[in-house]
Every structure is written in C-alpha cells, then in structure tokens.
Image (cartoon, helix red, strand yellow):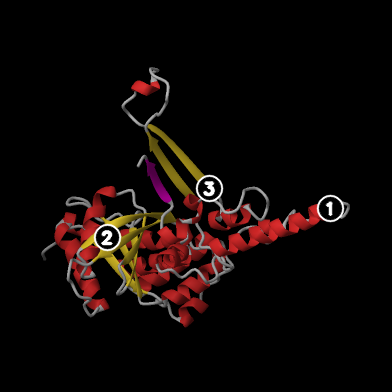
C-alpha cells in the first residue's frame, strides 16, 4: 500500500485549517446585532441550519458552531472571501478610501461594457503578474462590483487578513480603493483596472475619505441626496443666533439684513442640501520669501518656505457651511474652502504663480 508523502498530507491539512481560521476570524469581527443579517445576506448557510444555532450564547461558542456548519457545507476560501466582502460592505466606513480616475486615449470610443468580461480580464492580469494572489468579486447596486484582493508574493501565499478592496462602477472612469499598506502593488492594481475597463490611463485623485458614498457623490456630482448625518442634531447655524430683546431696534434691523445676506450667500455656495461627508482638508503651501529689504538669512534662502494646514471635523463640509451663519467667519468663505466638492479634492498644493 502506497503512503502519501508526509509533506503533502501536512500541507493539505494546513490549508483546511487556514480556511477554518479565516472563517473564525471573519465571523468573530461581526457584531452580534448584525450577525443574522450578514449571514442571511451571505446566503451560504440554509435557514434550517441557522435555526439550529443559539445566537444568545457567548460569542466564542457561537463562532465555533458557525465554523462547524461551514465545514459541514464544505466551505471554500472563495466562500470565506465573499463573507468578508459582505462584512466590509456593512462597515465600509472603517476603511479609508482613495479615488482613481481613468481616461480614454485620444479618439477612443466608448466600448460596450460586459461585467463578466471585466472580471475575467482583471483577474487574469493580476494572476499573470503575481503567482500568489486571491481575487474575489461581489456585484452590488448601481452596476458596481466590489473586488477583494489578497496579495501574496512569488514565494508566499496571499495574506487574507490584509486585503485591498476596489469598488468599480461600470461604464464610468472612477474606481474607489481602500488604502493599502502594500504600496508596491498599486501600479499592478492600476494596470489591471485600466486594461479590464478598457481605458488608456489612470491617475490618483487628491480626494480621500472614510465615507465611500460621499466620495461617489462628489465625483458623480450627486450632491442632492442624504448622507450620514453629523453627530449633533442641530446645525450650528440654528444655534446661538438669538437676538437680545433689549437691543436697539436699528441694530436689530441691521443684524437681520446681515443675517439674511449671510444665509443667502451660504446657500448660493453650498446649496440647500446635505453636504457630502469628508473628515478633513489639507493644504500645503510653498512660497519664496519676498521682502523689500535687502539682505537677511531668509532673503538668501533658495528653498521655498513650506507650511501645512489641515482642517479636521467629523463632518467638515457641514462645519464649513455653518461658520458664517454662526458668526464665526465672514461670508463668503475663501474659495479654497468652498471649492472642495466642485474640484473633487481635499488635498491642495498652493505654490507661487
């Protein structure tokens, strides 16, 4: 009787344990309040199987029972990756998203788009360039596809716990990617996106946020919709604006006229709809020292003076919109602050003309 080499048996067993551990870690990070919803969305375990599980037990025991069911159903790495995609869709705000813009070459026409062809081409490009890589897809609303990429190297298997995510909307030039520590794989990822979507080149935009829906609204110019609301239930412009009843009537009249002007200017700039949600805007200033006086250390300096200013807020655009009505800033605000949605940028470099 011929025995299998010990090394082969060990590797097969290890692979099974790796998938089981991947399931365990993925299920463990799902909040208990969302467990049933995510599992039903995954649609891998049957209703009858889910009914056999006690969802009120300790989470460690619950996870163990669910992993056993997955093993009974002969779940694969592909099934585990799909569950991880669904979890990430529910918790997309836990990642920081970058925006990439693609373009056609001169004179190139818009081709008919086939999603299955896109998936096949995208996967083949990565597989040809990198032996160890796992690529998974899940179709979403609005003709979007979520792509999960677990990167390996020529000698190491893919790391399933540090994947990159890409959200691509078909027949558009935009792709949204979760920021990855593996910067060296960005050129390959960009190449796969460009070729598979039949574009000519790709550039990274100066736009980043945790709020994927807001980034999408900015690049697609879809501002007039509802976004995640600010932590406070009362906008700044509705607070602390009461007038002293003992104030001179002429001052009250002037204040009323000024308040109406500020509200009108603010509405003209920001509109009367909720703003897309960004957490910050960053400005890098580079300028040469200029002085009418001769001499001095700075006058002889060839390198430009550099300064970085960063505005941060849980909801930056709504906060900026509230500044003038709250009397904190003059109206209108600087175009450098108000141009963020129209320019599709929250990273700016300001240099001498």
Q: Which circle's residue, 2 or 1, is located before the other in the chain?
A: 2
Dot 2 falls on a residue whose secondary structure is helix
Dot 3 falls on a residue whose secondary structure is strand
Dot 1 falls on a residue whose secondary structure is loop
- Assess whether mark 1 and mark 3 are in contact (beta carbons under 8 angstroms): no
Give the main secondary structure, helix, strand or loop, of the magenta stretch: strand
Image coords of residue 126 (percent x, y): 20, 61
Distance, label 3 to label 1, CA atoms, is 33 Å
Label disc, if present, on residue 312 of the rendered structure:
3
What residue did someone put label 2 on?
15
Image coords of residue 44 (percent x, y): 39, 76
Q: Which residues are magenta?
A: 347-351
Q: Is residue 222 above or below residue 245?
A: below
Image coords of residue 323 (percent x, y): 62, 52
What residue did someone put label 1 on?
244
Residue 185 or residue 195, whichever sits in front? 195
Task: Tell me if mark 3 has few (under 14), some (14-19) or many (20+) residues whose alpha carbon lies within 10 angstroms of its own.
Answer: some
Q: Which circle's residue, 2 or 3, is located before the other in the chain?
A: 2
- Assess whether mark 3 and mark 2 are in contact (beta carbons under 8 angstroms): no
């Amino acid at each position: 009787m011929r025995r299998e080499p010990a090394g082969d048996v060990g590797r097969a067993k290890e692979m099974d344990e790796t998938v089981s551990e991947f399931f365990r870690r993925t299920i463990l990070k799902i909040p208990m309040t969302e467990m049933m919803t995510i599992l039903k969305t995954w649609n891998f375990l049957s209703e009858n199987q889910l009914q056999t599980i006690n969802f009120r037990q300790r989470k460690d025991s619950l996870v163990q029972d669910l992993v056993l069911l997955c093993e009974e159903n002969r779940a694969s790495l592909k099934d585990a990756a799909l569950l991880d995609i669904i979890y990430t869709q529910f918790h997309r705000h836990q990642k920081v998203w970058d925006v990439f813009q693609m373009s056609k070459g001169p004179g190139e026409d818009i081709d008919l788009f086939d999603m299955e062809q896109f998936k096949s081409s995208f996967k083949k490009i990565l597989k040809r360039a990198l032996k160890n890589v796992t690529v998974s897809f899940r179709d979403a609303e609005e003709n979007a596809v979520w792509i999960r990429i677990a990167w390996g190297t020529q000698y190491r298997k893919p790391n399933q716990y540090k994947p990159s995510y890409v959200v691509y909307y078909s027949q558009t030039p935009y792709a949204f990617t979760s920021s990855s520590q593996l910067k060296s794989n960005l050129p390959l990822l960009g190449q796969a996106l460009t070729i598979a979507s039949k574009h000519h080149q790709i550039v990274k935009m100066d736009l980043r946020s945790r709020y994927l829906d807001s980034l999408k609204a900015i690049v697609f110019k879809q501002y007039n919709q509802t976004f995640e609301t600010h932590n406070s239930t009362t906008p700044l412009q509705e607070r602390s604006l009461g007038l002293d009843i003992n104030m001179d009537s002429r001052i009250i009249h002037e204040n009323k006229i000024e308040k109406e002007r500020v509200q009108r200017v603010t509405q003209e700039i920001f509109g009367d709809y909720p703003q897309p949600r960004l957490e910050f805007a960053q400005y890098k200033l580079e300028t040469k020292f200029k002085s009418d006086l001769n001499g001095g250390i700075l006058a002889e300096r060839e390198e430009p003076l550099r300064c970085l200013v960063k505005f941060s807020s849980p909801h930056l655009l709504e906060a900026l919109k509230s500044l003038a009505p709250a009397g904190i800033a003059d109206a209108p605000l600087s175009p450098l602050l108000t141009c963020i949605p129209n320019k599709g940028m929250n990273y700016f470099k300001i240099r001498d003309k």
